[in-house]
Amino acid sequence: MIHPDTEVRFINAEKGYGLVATKFIPRGTITWVQDELDQIFKRKKVQTLNPYIRQYLETYSFTNKYGDYVLCWDNAKFVNHSFHPSCFSTPYDFEIAVRDIYPGEELTDDYGYLNVEKPFDVIDEGSQRKKVYPDDILHFYNEWDLLIKENAPKVTEVKQILTDLIPAPVWNEFLSALKKPHEMRSILECYYDRKVNA
């Protein structure tokens, strides 16, 4: 489930639609949680779908560490890519805001940790990266782990709306890792290796 203080808006002709904040969302806010309504499709099942449905699924879903396609049931599927994202995924199946997000600003993710199927070009943001690759996690997980650890303590300092959707054992494990950062799970866990699973 996506944070309720958001809505889909037309961003521009190049991006199309995106998800923006309708209220101030402070750094450390849990902005998305994978919940029971999100649909999970096994890779073999996807190949049997009607081509039109399969194209929709491939456009709006992401691939988890098991190689399954995860299709968010709500507006989370409209979160656009950025190499300077406002939100960041954790290996605990929820995302957090890694900076303050003001009303009218987009909620964005770095698609590099979403196990994209093939490399694709993105809008140039002035960063060194110009493409998203299927194996970006292997190259950037150390940097991304540091970003998560830097922002994770803020999670307990701001008001949260979505924590009831996080399974208690997962939430307790996350809280324990806040006290012992060396126990924080790595985003590398989210990588799906197509070569091993081919």
Image (cartoon, helix red, strand yellow):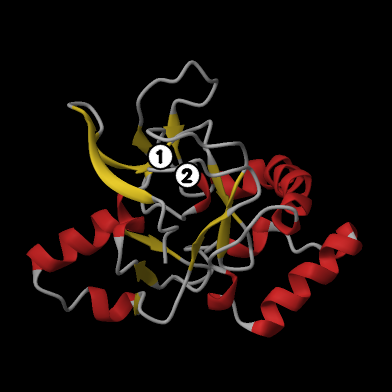
- Identity of the amino acid at label 2? Asp
Horizontal side of 143 relative to 118 (left or right) equals: right
**Which residue is most to the top?**
126
Position above or below: 43 against 74: below
Q: Are marks 1 and 2 in contact (CB under 8 Å)?
A: yes
In the rendering, at what x and y percent does residue 79 appear? 37, 47
- Image point (36%, 74%), residue name: 38
Horizontal side of 54 relative to 170 (left or right) equals: left
Alpha-carbon neighbours of circle 1 within 10 Å: few (<14), some, or many (≥20)? many
Comparing 117 with 12, the one in front is 12
Quadrant assignment for the N terminus: bottom left
- Identity of the amino acid at label 1? His
Quadrant assignment for the C terminus: bottom left
- Image point (75%, 53%), residue name: 157
Secondary structure state at the residue bearing disc 2: strand
In the rendering, at what x and y percent does residue 92 appear? 63, 68
Comparing 187 with 10, the one in front is 10
The numbered mark, 1 or 2, whose residue comes first in the sequence reads 1
In the rendering, at what x and y percent does residue 34 appear? 47, 70
Q: Label 1 to label 2, Cα distance in Å?
A: 5 Å
- Image point (30%, 50%), residue name: 78
Residue named by callout 2: 109
- Image point (48%, 15%), residue name: 126
Residue named by callout 1: 81
In the rendering, at what x and y percent does residue 77 appear? 32, 56
